[in-house]
Image (spheres, rainbow, N blue to C red):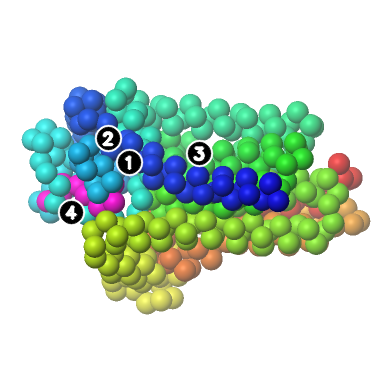
Amino acid sequence: MKSAIAKIITVVLAAFCMPALLVLSAMIPKEYIRDNMLRSAEYLYESELFGDVIEGIDGSRIDRYADSILLNIAYHYDKNFPLRSVMVSAYYFTPDHEENENLLIAVRDDMGMNRQYLRYWHGSIAVIRTLLTLMPINGIYIFNGVIILALIGLYIYLFAKDGDYAAPVALLISLIITRSFYVPLSCEYAPTYILMLVSSCIAVILYKKGQSGWLKPLFFITGMATSFADFLTTETLTLLVPLISLIWLLRKAGRRSTDLIKNTVIFTVLWACGYVVMWVSKWLLCSAVFSENAMQYVTDHVSERLGGDLGLSMWQYITGALLRNIGCLFPLGYGAFGGIIFIALMIFAAYRGYVYKRGSINGYLVTALAVMGVIPYIRYIVLHNHSYIHYFFTYRAQAATIMAIVLIVWAITEKKDG
């Protein structure tokens, strides 16, 4: 009973702490961040709004558009009305300029806010605004890289110390194929990767310490944190990579096969509930703060993500979203040679799985991994407009698919368990 109460209290505290941290960041006086904000605005203005790190490779595209909006919102937080400014998430906008120039004008000329962006929490601003007291955005990009590398190192250590190299190898391969080395270069891309790795490491630690009872609140809180911090980029990674890691551990420990499916369903539902609860709470809180119904903004947003006005048929939308996202995987994008290499890798995986398969295969494990690997493509189909337009970053959700494929091949070719 005490344990259940402790878990409920933890979830409730997490639900309150996330918005509280955002409000606290809004209380930082603007003059404390102005210099680094100006340097950041100048840096973004001198950068391409959607520039490819490698020319012609869509998967290397960096979204300075979203970063400019994030910083614009962060700049317009008002320490005198922190809760209200966090709720409305307003920024300076004019259609005469691109968003990076709007940011520069807003900071340089101290322009007021004139457009709201309340449909998201924009929770990453709690970290960004705090770091802006110390460094400009190019310094934050380095900070992102250091944190992500450290978390990858911790993940590898947690498995490798017990002689289990499958999950770390699968993770590294998935990160390479989804060109994840570009993720730290965008404050839009980084939050889901950090949450993915933090949640994965905590899940592994809890399981190995015999604290599996805390995994349910962990997935619920991870769903909340994803909704809070993400800009709708690769949100499914924070569910799938920790879940794949956990399912692999359950299998290695000799748990009943039915547990693999049961836990896959339970943790997925908990994550989804956390995600929805946190997102809806923003709309309800906005409605309370402004004494008006904020749901209309949300309804318009959802309709836009599900549909669109690009003049495409539903078939063109869905096939285009799938092909565009798959086409960003490495080494696709490097012409015919890249395509041949990619196909060769797929053939090699299939060949190894068929030729070197064991006599006995855990069908429940393969099924659980396969279902998780398919989820990103379901996401692309459901949010086809968003996935079609923003394929150059949504494609990284396939890291979970690649990870699942590697572990399926590993599982069916491994000579023995444990």
Badge 4 or badge 3: first in the primary sequence = 4
For mark 2, give the secondary structure.
loop
Q: CA distance from mark 4 to mark 1?
A: 19 Å
Residue 417: in magenta span: no
Q: Position of residue 88 (x, y in %)?
A: 25, 52
Identify residue for label 4: 115
Q: Position of residue 319 (x, y in %)?
A: 46, 69
Residue at 48% in and 68% down: 381
Q: Quadrant of residue 260?
A: bottom right
User: Which numbered disc covers residue 27?
Assistant: 2
For mark 3, give the secondary structure.
helix
The amino acid type, in three-letter code, at marker 1 is Val
Residue at 66% in and 32% down: 156
Badge 4 or badge 2: first in the primary sequence = 2
The amino acid type, in three-letter code, at marker 2 is Met
Crowding at mark 1 (Cα within 10 Å: few <14, some 14-19, many 20+): many
Disc 4 and disc 2 in contact, CB within 8 angstroms? no
Crowding at mark 2 (Cα within 10 Å: few <14, some 14-19, many 20+): some
Residue at 28% in and 38% down: 26
Q: Quadrant of residue 249?
A: top right
User: Which numbered disc covers residue 194?
Assistant: 3
